Amino acid sequence: GDQVEQSPSALSLHEGTDSALRCNFTTTMRSVQWFRQNSRGSLISLFYLASGTKENGRLKSAFDSKERRYSTLHIRDAQLEDSGTYFCAAEDRGGRALIFGTGTTVSVSP
Amino acid sequence: NSKVIQTPRYLVKGQGQKAKMRCIPEKGHPVVFWYQQNKNNEFKFLINFQNQEVLQQIDMTEKRFSAECPSNSPCSLEIQSSEAGDSALYLCASRGGLGGAETLYFGSGTRLTVL
């Protein structure tokens, strides 16, 4: 079936540094959504993209508008509160349910 | 961020017991999803509804789960006979429509442990 490959699986950052997470899709996707899951299990929606880029504070996400087969999430000037597990989830052109990646665990240290 | 409410937060059951969890979607959201997240961070789509109607469900859900989203009552997902492999975080989500361009909002989940 359709797959969402997320990388890296884990990321250790120092405060103030920048990094990027990526999701590759095995087929063309209609949209992508990025989430951060905290230690209590709550999934917080960060971005929904059907194309292009969106930015919110120190986070920026992009969805490849041409082939629609990858998306990125950039973290700028990492802070301690950015720690958590980040998931991308994509919706294919025919489906109604999101297909999730297996997450990137981000740890930000002083 | 999200106003999806899930109860209970934790659920502990013995094998063979029923396990029922509830979800109140965001007001005005007719589309509800249930997902299972295992300890390896793998998400499995279980079922989705539009208003009270089931749109899609996987084979496991059809055979072993009972789910509904009645009008004016919380949605519910119930495992008829719990198995050890059902231990997971069960997440409910809602959104305003089916046709894309709609952010999916998740509740905080029900963490089920089957002893």
Image (tube, coloured by chain):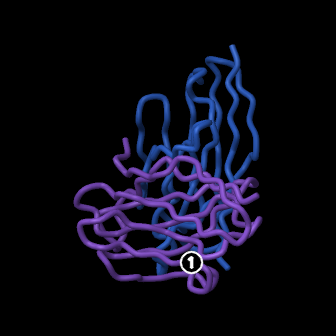
Q: Is residue B44 left or right of residue B40?
A: left
Where the N terminus of chain A falls, by quadrant? bottom right
**Chain under callout 1:** B
Q: Nearer the viewer, residue B79 or B23?
A: B79
**Amino acid found under the numbered disc labelled 1:** Phe
- Examine the rendered structure and indicate whether residue A21 appears above or below residue B56: above
Q: Residue B94 appears at what percent x and percent y? A: 38, 61
Write down the quadrant of residue B60 in the picture.
bottom right
Residue visible at 28% across and 62% down? B29
Q: Nearer the viewer, residue A48 or B49?
A: B49
The residue at which mark 1 appears reads as: B65
Chain appearing in blue on the rendered image: A
Q: Residue A32 appears at what percent x and percent y? A: 49, 59
Element type at mark 1: strand
Chain B color in figure: purple
Residue visible at 46% across and 70% down? A30
